[in-house]
Amino acid sequence: MGGLTGSMDSNKTMDGTYLGRSGLKVSGFAFGTMTFGREADEQASHKMLDLFAEHGGNFIDTADAYGNGTADEVFARWLADKNRDDFVIASKVRFPTGPGMNDVGLSRKHIIASAEASLRRLGTDHLDLLQIHCWDRGTPIEETLSTLDQLVRDGKVRYLGSSNLRGWQLQKMVETSRRLGLEAFVSHQPQYNLLSRHTEWEVLEVCAAEGLGVVPWAPLRGGWLSGRYRPDMDGPPEGSRIKTAEEKGWSETWARYANDHTWSILAELDRVAAIHDTTPAAVAIAWVAQHPVVTAPILGASRFEQLEGNLAAINVELTDEDVQALNRVSDVEGSYPYDDFIDSAQTGR
């Protein structure tokens, strides 16, 4: 089933681009800190931050749950001798940050405690962007949204966004903020890549309709689209992200993705990469970046060489033919109401 298409006339670059309908300018790629203090030690993390900044990157994405604050601390020590205002710092709140019953969720208590703890760890008096990390079924959204609004009014947060919501959840958040006259979301952070096309069906449609900047995570789907994994392999190599996923119960497992659909996408990535004299990873990231609704894909890496390779996407400009070929091979068929019957009924006269 095809999603949003549109002309792919220009690639995202590190030149500033507005985040949604806000006046906030961010680099065309963001850098995620989830590996900091985990797969990447502090020295490696700082070296990668240096590289990202040298390429013109200013958009740093972190979260209170990354290493239970460790990622923030690693980033803060790098930021300490920089001009803080040169960077757009985004964080998230929702997941557990401690053992207490209120150390999780989107209640007023947890949001305020989490935001203040993030500010202390980061050594700054404000977050440029605070995003809800996921839906919270237990908290009224009016409580969540009014608390976020107050953080903006108090000067602790500049802009608001969301992550990991379904289409109806995102639309409900947008409409409730509008109805109550509260600070609106300017962005949404979904998983989006050639192996996660379902995001197009409603989430990206809402973002396009409401003018939300889209900041996709996992453009390589945990390394599956990097070109490292091949159909003649019996399983993921020791020490690889996919091997770790199997050990920790993450979603990007070998059993889930080692199939003909994935191998077909990788074969097409190889073909397009050869045309552009680049890597499959750079092509996969460029495909995400060139989507007309996308603002800035989040690049993640555990090693300097990985980030160096991912940044090659800055210089890849896919043609319409490239994009259409990758769209065809990665397309996923939807069942009702995400099927051709509904598509034709909506467009027919």
Image (spheres, rainbow, N blue to C red):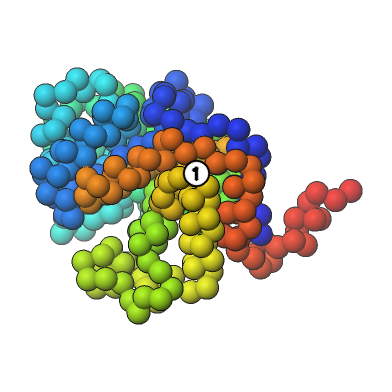
Q: Is residue 348 in sight in this rendering?
A: yes
Image point 26% across, 65% down: which residue?
240
Question: What residue do we see at 40% from left, 76% from top?
Answer: 232
Crowd band around label 1 with a 10 angstrom C-alpha radius: few (<14), some (14–19), many (20+): some
Residue 186, horizontal then vertical, whole percent: 46, 32
* Relative vertical location of residue 12 with respect to residue 41 in this rendering, above or below: above
* Residue 238 relative to residue 193: left or right: left
Position of residue 303 relative to residue 294, above or below, is below
Q: Which residue is painted at 66% across and 54% down in the image?
A: 2
Residue with the mark numbered 1: 276
Residue at 13% over, 41% down? 74
**Residue 341's quadrant in the figure?**
bottom right
Identify the residue at the far right of this view. Answer: 349
What count of labels does the image hold? Answer: 1
Name the foreground residue: 335 vs 179: 335
Q: x, y (%) of residue 72?
A: 18, 41
